[in-house]
Amino acid sequence: MKLNELTIKEAHEGLLKKKFTSVELTEACLVEIKKLNKKLNVFVTVTEYEAIEAAKAVDKKIAKGGKIGILEGIPAAIKDNILVRDIRCTAASRILENYVAPYDATVIEKLKSAGAIILGKTNLDEFAMGGSTENSYFGPTKNPHDPACVSGGSSGGSAAAVAANMCIWALGSDTGGSVREPASFCGVTGMKPTYGAVSRYGLMAMASSLDQIGPITKNAEDAEIIFEAIRGKDKMDSTTVEREIKKNNKILKIGLPKEYFAEGLDSKVEKKIREAVAKLEGVGIKIQEVSLPHTEYSLAVYYLIMPAEVSSNLARYDGVRYGYSTKKSKTLLENYLKSRAEGFGDEAKRRIMLGTYALSAGYYDAYYLQAQKMRTLIRQDFEKVFKEVDCLITPTAPTTAFKIGEKINDPLTMYLADIYTVSANVAGVPAISVPCGLANKMPVGLQIMASWFNEEKLFQAAKLI
């Protein structure tokens, strides 16, 4: 096995036993980046010099007999909407093409203090808006399993980086499935923590009541390691809370929500999910059908709340304070309007307009307020069902990865790819996607959801599968 193909745990054990150095591990990943990046378009920025220097520091520590943590000296990739100080952070948008981050996001601070090596920043849908990483100013990221297919979105670069062994693990962000869907399409593990479990400080805001930062890894055990490293209360994010993780919670009963196994699900994808569920039954776990009756409204709720918050959050990109500014304006208002028109891509503009409309006078009560009321009902569905079962299992996406260009001109069809993932963000529950075989010669992802701050059960079920 090549060094860049190792898991976090394997790489850590190798460093401890001095089988290889952190520099050798980092260089193995950088070689793969140089070999594949032109073909797959995964990295927006590669920080080779900084990565090698950080790896050298870890090797010196090991040589002196110092103890190293589980992430120390292990190379990672970071989605390009999470700030890393003094490194360009573009959110894959023209409007931030040359923006350099002035500070570290809280998760980056934690990872740096844990000794993680940052290889660079990965491609995404512009401002994390999309399910295919085709809405990037830098062009689409291709799927390592088949470069004619999408890598999923919006964390397509991070998922492809892990799947192609260009890094040992990566960070993404998940607003409606943006970690889990690309993990499913690329055949890796992607986890969205409970809303409030991980700080959003230093993540470029898309929809503040839905966004969460999460790990993309080669297996569930590695996802748990990253989650443990980045979770916790942060004074810079008032939505975060400190919760003790409940250990030794045995999984006895898993629910299959009937609404997730209905029309629109690829029969080959369903077959793979059912096979995995049968294996769980085989080791003594009880499986029962459950219902989340308001699930059918999740997508509509999400596509009202999210654009409303997008229109508010993206108002800061005005061509004056930072980012792209047009050269063609005569007045301040003209500068605002032209900078935004030229700086934002089509999908960002579409969502800003939808959100502005939903929040406008005369429509607020009919759309945004109704969506928030329905959000409460969706959350109550989860509260009820988690009194009956420990976890829920569903498909991550209705299909395997589709061809590049296949859905880009049909936004509604593209939005439907989020149908199984958005409810976890709307309700705020933790969810993870794990690979469970191939269909149509492409990876299939199985999604597990647990109750709020019950990540322990999520990882237990994921490791079992």
Image: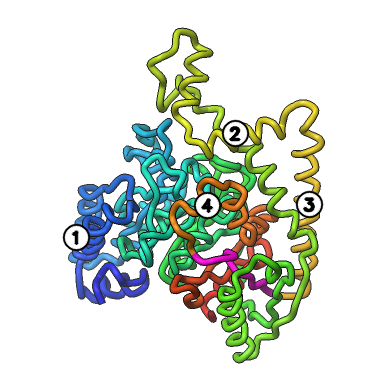
Disc 2 marks which residue? 352
Please tell me which of labels 2 and 1 falls first in the chain. Answer: 1
Task: Tell me the tag on residue 376.
Answer: 3
Which amino acid is tagged 1? Lys
* Residue 106 vs residue 428, the one in the foreground: 428
Please tell me which of labels 4 and 2 falls first in the chain. Answer: 2
Mark 4 neighbour class, 10 Å CA radius: few under 14, some 14 to 19, many 20 or more: some
Please tell me which of labels 2 and 3 falls first in the chain. Answer: 2
Q: CA distance from mark 1 to mark 3?
A: 53 Å
> Measuring 64% from the left and 45% from the top, which residue is drawn there?
209
> Measuring 24% from the left and 48% from the top, which residue is drawn there?
50
Q: CA distance from mark 2 to mark 3?
A: 24 Å
Task: Tell me the tag on residue 60.
Answer: 1
Is label 4 in a helix, a strand or a loop?
loop
Disc 4 marks which residue? 407
Asked whether the viewer can see residue 221, the reply is no
